[in-house]
Image: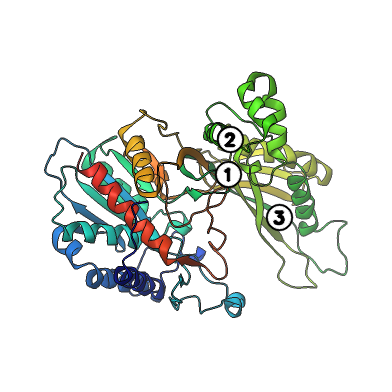
């Protein structure tokens, strides 16, 4: 392994990360659709973080061009000496998810304390994603200390609202870079996702090369009000409960197409892990005969299930205002992570198919507001009772980036850097990302959209230290943070000096 831990640098870089964690840069759901504002207290932490960067990384601010995009987005550009080479873009985001007030007492250390215990840095954002954010800056600062003058331009692009879908941050950054470099004008984009893991029987680095799609769908029941002393057989909430039951009892059908990156990850595991399940190894060799059975087995595995099927979760329910008044409106919101073999339209059709029999039983009119289409009355009005299904937000499954030896310069240099830094025994393999990142705005910037972080990340098979993301006691091992710095340092050199 390349990494040699200098105690002084280890402590200093941990403190700089801790300082970033101490600055609260939280994205709240109610901020969706709002225009960022320096006068709004919820946004002020992003200004403080920018000031921290200025003092912590002076060489970056001296030698790179810094641009502020849409108030809080940050672009740092180190121009290369060879303008014929496409730039590389490293991404991260400066925002974190909130900390639920009722969980604060469960934290070993206050969630924004940036507490350092000698082994870990504690606090919200320590993993997601101020580790990779500051590791990139640390790596660039070290390179500049050595007089780094790359042939290829290096761009650092930092959004500020990834946790609420990135429309004000990464979207504007991606548009800026698309305008500047043109369609497929960058060599690669590297963002969070994927991880190192040993949970598959061999040391592996799983790199996200594709993401599932996304759809938030709202279902609303509208009904006449009245006094609850004379209720109808079913209230709006009661009918909504029936709909929820139908949704949860009807999961989406799984499939394992040849294009799913999971298949390649399984084949890598089968090749290199001596303890890999013999039946599954045989099934992978003879997929034409055993595909259906393999899908069934994987669907029963909680970690693999959602790599081959659409995930659905009823996450919001709201209805009623007073205990003795019939609810005039009630709604749910369902979050979907769409499998690569399905589309937003498939999800909308599936839900509409479940709704129509319920609407028939209760004489409800049905209105459908499909994504990108005008409202459609699917079932004519029978009474004042109605159900409306509306797609609030959606994105199709991402295109798959080239992966495998010789598929692209981006993949070869990433895989080579991983093995150089962490050991030749590490198997580098593509994976499907079940969650979404800011890369969804970068599809036109480059065909090489890769997702990998060193310290810890959310993956379907979990990085070894990934269990604390978005929950109590988020923290990162300092040694993992230093490993992140080493990786970015070598990756930038390996690509930008090309």
Q: Pick whichever, 365 or 39, lies toward us.
A: 39
Residue drawn 39% across the image and 62% down it: 481
| Residue for badge 1 | 200
Residue 299, horizontal then vertical, whole percent: 70, 38
| On screen, residue 48 above or below 218 | below
Q: Pick whichever, 23 or 396, lies toward us.
A: 23
Residue 437, horizontal then vertical, whole percent: 45, 50
State the colouring used for the structure image: rainbow
Q: Residues within 10 Å of mark 1 (few under 14, many from 20)?
A: some
> Which numbered disc flags the more N-terminal residue, 2 or 1?
1
Please tell me whether mark 2 sits on a helix, a strand or a loop. helix
Cβ–Cβ below 8 Å for labels 2 and 3? no
Alpha carbon of mark 2 to alpha carbon of mark 1: how far? 35 Å
| Residue for badge 2 | 345
Please tell me whether mark 1 sits on a helix, a strand or a loop. loop
Residue 194, horizontal then vertical, whole percent: 47, 47
Residue drawn 53% across the image and 61% down it: 469
Numbered disc in front, either 2 or 1: 1
Please tell me whether mark 3 sits on a helix, a strand or a loop. strand
Q: Quadrant of the C terminus?
A: top left
Alpha carbon of mark 3 to alpha carbon of mark 1: how far? 49 Å
| Residue for badge 3 | 222
- Left or right position of 63 against 68: left
Cβ–Cβ below 8 Å for labels 3 and 1? no
> Which numbered disc flags the more N-terminal residue, 2 or 3?
3
Q: Pick whichever, 330 or 173, lies toward us.
A: 173
| On screen, residue 311 above or below 19 | above
State the mark number for residue 84. Answer: none
Q: Pick whichever, 295 or 93, lies toward us.
A: 295
């Amino acid at each position: 392994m390349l990494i040699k831990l200098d105690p002084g640098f280890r402590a200093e870089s941990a403190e700089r990360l801790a300082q970033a964690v101490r600055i609260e840069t939280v994205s709240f759901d109610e901020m969706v659709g709002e225009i960022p504002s320096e006068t709004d207290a919820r946004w002020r932490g992003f200004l403080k973080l920018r000031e921290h960067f200025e003092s912590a990384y002076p060489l970056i601010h001296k030698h790179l061009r810094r641009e502020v995009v849409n108030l809080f987005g940050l672009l740092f550009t180190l121009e290369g000496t060879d303008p014929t080479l496409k730039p590389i873009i490293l991404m991260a985001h400066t925002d974190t998810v909130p900390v639920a007030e009722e969980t604060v007492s469960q934290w070993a250390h206050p969630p924004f304390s940036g507490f350092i215990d000698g082994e870990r840095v504690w606090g919200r954002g320590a993993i997601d994603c101020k580790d990779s954010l500051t590791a990139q800056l640390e790596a660039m600062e070290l390179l500049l200390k050595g007089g780094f003058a790359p042939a290829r331009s290096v761009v650092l692009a930092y959004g500020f609202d990834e946790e609420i879908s990135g429309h004000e941050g990464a979207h504007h950054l991606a548009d800026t870079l698309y305008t500047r470099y043109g369609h497929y004008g960058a060599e690669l984009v590297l963002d969070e996702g994927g991880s190192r893991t040993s949970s598959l029987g061999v040391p592996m680095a799983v790199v996200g090369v594709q993401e599932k799609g996304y759809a938030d769908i709202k279902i609303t029941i509208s009904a006449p009000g009245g006094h609850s002393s004379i209720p109808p057989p079913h209230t709006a909430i009661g009918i909504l409960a029936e709909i929820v039951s139908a949704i949860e009892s009807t999961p989406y059908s799984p499939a394992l197409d040849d294009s799913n990156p999971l298949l390649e990850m399984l084949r890598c595991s089968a090749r290199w892990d001596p303890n890999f399940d013999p039946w599954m190894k045989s099934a992978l060799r003879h997929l034409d005969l055993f595909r259906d059975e393999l899908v069934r087995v994987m669907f029963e595995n909680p970690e693999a299930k959602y790599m081959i099927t659409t995930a659905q979760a009823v996450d919001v329910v709201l209805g009623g205002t007073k205990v003795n008044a019939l609810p005039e409106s009630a709604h749910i919101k369902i979050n979907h992570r769409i499998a690569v073999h399905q589309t937003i339209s498939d999800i909308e059709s599936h839900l509409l198919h479940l709704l129509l029999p319920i609407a028939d039983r209760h004489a409800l009119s049905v209105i459908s507001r499909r994504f990108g289409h005008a409202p459609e009355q699917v079932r004519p009005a029978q009474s004042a009772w109605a159900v409306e299904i509306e797609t609030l937000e959606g994105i199709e499954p991402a295109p798959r980036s080239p992966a495998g030896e010789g598929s692209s310069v981006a993949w070869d240099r990433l895989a080579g850097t991983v093995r150089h830094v962490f050991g030749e025994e590490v198997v580098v393999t593509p994976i499907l990302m079940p969650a979404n990142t800011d890369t969804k705005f970068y599809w036109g910037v480059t065909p090489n959209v890769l997702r990998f972080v060193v310290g810890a990340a959310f993956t379907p098979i979990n990085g070894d230290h990934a269990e604390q993301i978005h929950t109590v006691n988020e923290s990162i091992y300092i040694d993992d943070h230093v490993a992140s710095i080493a990786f970015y340092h070598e990756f930038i050199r390996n690509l930008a000096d090309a």
